[in-house]
Amino acid sequence: MNPINERIKKFISLKNIAVAGVSRNPATETGNIIYKKFKDNGYNVFAVNPNAIEIEGDKCYPNLKSIPSPVDGVFINTSPSVTMNVLKDCKEAGIKYAWIHSSIGNGSYNSEAEKYCEENGIELIPRGCPMMYVGKVDFPHKCLKGVLKLTGKLPFGL
């Protein structure tokens, strides 16, 4: 099995997940939808946004280091310009697993991320969406996963 598949399996087996890039406008934001998906599937989930106090009725943290509980992995749904800051926070907080969101476009992907993670011992899933793997997968994500597989744009095949 390829290393990205192994990382996906490991990431979705983690129990304490931070979601960096949740929004104060929850109805339309991908980060909030993914936050809720993790929460609804039994994960201990932590919202991260330096400009929010509460998300989905839960406390929101300004950064990864401010979360008082252990965090096993972080899902990154920020603008690409912020992604590296989140990964640096991962290193400082001792978080060993990170997943950068992307679907059709680049999403949160930053070209420096893979090298940084390799050099700093962070197991990175550089693209994709946990909505294609966590819990009961909804119809749109089943379709998206199928299309990405058929077009060769899904670099891993779980």
Image (spheres, rainbow, N blue to C red):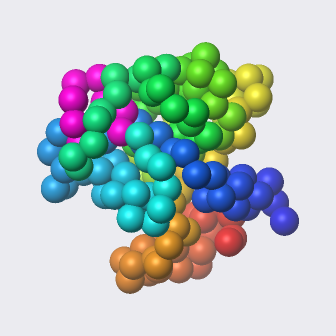
Residue 75 visible? The answer is no
In screen coordinates, is 30 left or right of 85? left
Q: Position of residue 96 (x, y in %)?
A: 68, 34
**Where 147 falls versus 76 (above or below)?**
below
Residue at horizontal 19 percent and vertical 55 percent from the top: 28
Q: Nearer the viewer, residue 100 or 68?
A: 68
Instruction: Tell me how many marks there are.
Output: 0
Q: Quadrant of residue 122?
A: top right
Residue 23 vertical position relative to residue 135 in the rendered view, above or below: above
Quadrant housing the C terminus = bottom right
Q: Residue 12 colored magenta? A: no
Q: Residue at x 53, y 79 (%)?
A: 146
Q: Is residue 41 left or right of residue 150?
A: left
Which span is picked out in magenta?
Answer: 47-55
- Residue at 51% of width from left, 45% of height from top? 17
Residue furthest to the right in view is: 1
Q: Which quadrant is home to the N terminus?
A: bottom right
Q: Quadrant of residue 8?
A: bottom right
x then y, percent, for residue 131: 45, 65
Residue closest to the eye, 93 or 100:
93
Q: Can you give x and y, in whole percent of width and height, for residue 71 in the image? A: 56, 36
Given residues 21 and 145, the one toward you in this image is: 21
User: Image point 57% across, 33% down: which residue?
Assistant: 70
Can residue 42 be seen by looking at this rendering? Answer: yes
Q: Can you give x and y, in whole percent of width and height, for residue 95 in the image?
A: 63, 31
Instruction: Give left or right: position of 80 versus 126.
Output: left
Is residue 25 shown left or right of residue 155? left
Displayed quadrant of residue 153? bottom right
Vertical comparison of 36 with 25: above or below: below
Residue 52 lies in magenta, yes or no?
A: yes
